[in-house]
Image (spheres, rainbow, N blue to C red):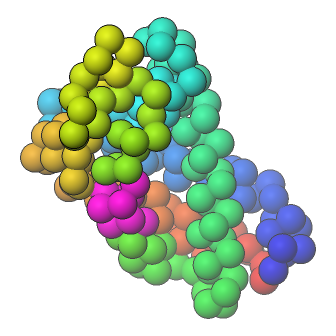
Amino acid sequence: MVKSLLDNAAQLLIWGLAATLVMTTMLNGSHGLGWSRLSLPFLVGTMFTGRRTYANILGFIVYTLGGWAFAAIYAAFFFAIGHANWWIGLLFGVAHAIVLLVVLLPLIAYMHPRMANEYDGPTYTRRLEPPGFIGLNYGYRTPLSVLIAQMAYGAVLGLCFQFNSFQA
């Protein structure tokens, strides 16, 4: 399976980037329209720097690298089941969103050097608001925004791997 992933590395990079851009565009659109205050690239970037401008840029770069890493996980899943299409990718995106919302977002407050947590509140160095359970601290539409964006990510990967001779 690893050899197959390496043989298809160019496709994995192209379609992983495409899926990441679709997902990020949807999440940033949701943020820009006021449906959610969640900006995952910003949260990732502020783990590395306290300067907001640099945090957005660095966060987008790290977030894109993460998108490629998750594309490899999706590809390994497609190889494992021996099939790829948009709806299988969409269902895997639902699972991805549930883990992100229920497990990872609530935990980020305890790992992030600039984020307050639900128990201690803000300090001079920890001023970012924690996302809370399923991201509800960032708006009641946040879970739906994340779910739809992750579904689109999975659907794009499933569709692209289905129609672009991603060979097992």
Q: Is residue 84 something that shows in the picture? A: yes
Q: Position of residue 148 (x, y in %)?
A: 29, 57
Queried whether the magenta region covers residue 166, the answer comes back as no
| 111 sits to left or right of 129 | right
Q: Is residue 130 above or below residue 70?
A: above
Residue at the extreme left of the image, as rendered? 140
Position of the C terminus by quadrant: bottom right
The stretch of residues the image draws in magenta is 96-104
| 61 sits to left or right of 107 | right
The residue nearer to you, when weighing 168 against 163, is: 168
| The quarter of the displayed image where residue 69 is located | bottom right
Who's the residue at 61% across and 78% down the image?
Answer: 77
Q: Position of residue 109 (x, y in %)?
A: 36, 39
Q: Is residue 168 above or below residue 47?
A: below
Queried whether the magenta region covers residue 101, the answer comes back as yes
Who's the residue at 45% across and 46% down the image?
Answer: 22
| The quarter of the displayed image where residue 9 is located | bottom right
Majority secondary structure of magenta residues: helix
Who's the residue at 22% across and 39% down the image?
Answer: 119
